[in-house]
Image (cartoon, rainbow, N blue to C red):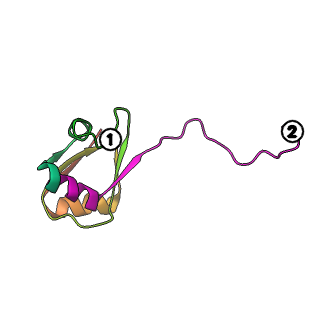
């Protein structure tokens, strides 16, 4: 049976999986938990992400408040939107 079925695709063992967080999700977190410093520890304490998750901030949605964000990766549009509102972005 194994020899009859073709093998498809390729799985990269070195791939880094990110958990995507959009700007609208960050705004929901700010409103719900009253957090202005979005760090990995704060997200883990509130049960939003897991212990070993890597976070990437994406630029979909609107941000209405100034926040300080700490993440593993940030898209250019998200960084620009955060800095326009007076916030800052720190990479881990």
Q: Is residue 6 visible?
A: yes
- Cα distance in 3D space between marks 1 and 2: 40 Å
Mark 2 = which residue? 1
Q: Is residue 61 magenta?
A: no
Quarter where residue 58 is shown: bottom left
Q: Residue at x 74, y 48 (%)?
A: 8
Residue where numbered disc 1 is placed: 49
Q: State the residue in front, 31 or 78.
A: 31
Q: Which mark is residue 16?
A: none
Q: Residue 23's spot in the image, x, y percent?
A: 27, 60
Q: Is residue 52 left or right of residue 10?
A: left
The furthest residue to the bottom: 62
Task: Identify the secondary structure beneath mark 1.
Answer: loop
Mark 2, secondary structure of its residue: loop
Q: Give percent across and percent down for residue 79.
A: 27, 57
Q: Nearer the viewer, residue 61 or 14?
A: 61
Mark 2 crowdedness (10 Å alpha carbons): few <14, some 14-19, many ≥20: few
Q: Is residue 52 left or right of residue 4?
A: left
Magenta stretch bounds: 1-30
Write the residue at 78% across / 44% down.
7
Q: Magenta span has 9?
A: yes
Q: Position of residue 54 (x, y in %)?
A: 37, 40
**Residue 5 occupies quadrant:** top right
Mark 1 Cα shell of 10 Å, populated few (<14), some (14-19), many (≥20): some
The first of marks 1 and 2 along the sequence is 2
* Disc nearest the viewer among 1 and 2: 2
């Amino acid at each position: 049976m194994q020899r009859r079925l073709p093998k498809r695709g390729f799985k990269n063992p070195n791939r880094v999986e990110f958990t995507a967080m959009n700007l609208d999700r960050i705004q929901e977190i700010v409103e719900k938990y009253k957090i202005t410093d979005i760090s990995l520890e704060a997200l883990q304490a509130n049960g939003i992400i897991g212990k070993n998750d890597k976070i990437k901030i994406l630029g979909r949605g609107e941000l209405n408040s100034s926040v300080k964000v700490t993440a593993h990766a940030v898209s250019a549009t998200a960084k620009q939107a955060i800095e326009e509102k007076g916030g800052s972005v720190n990479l881990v």
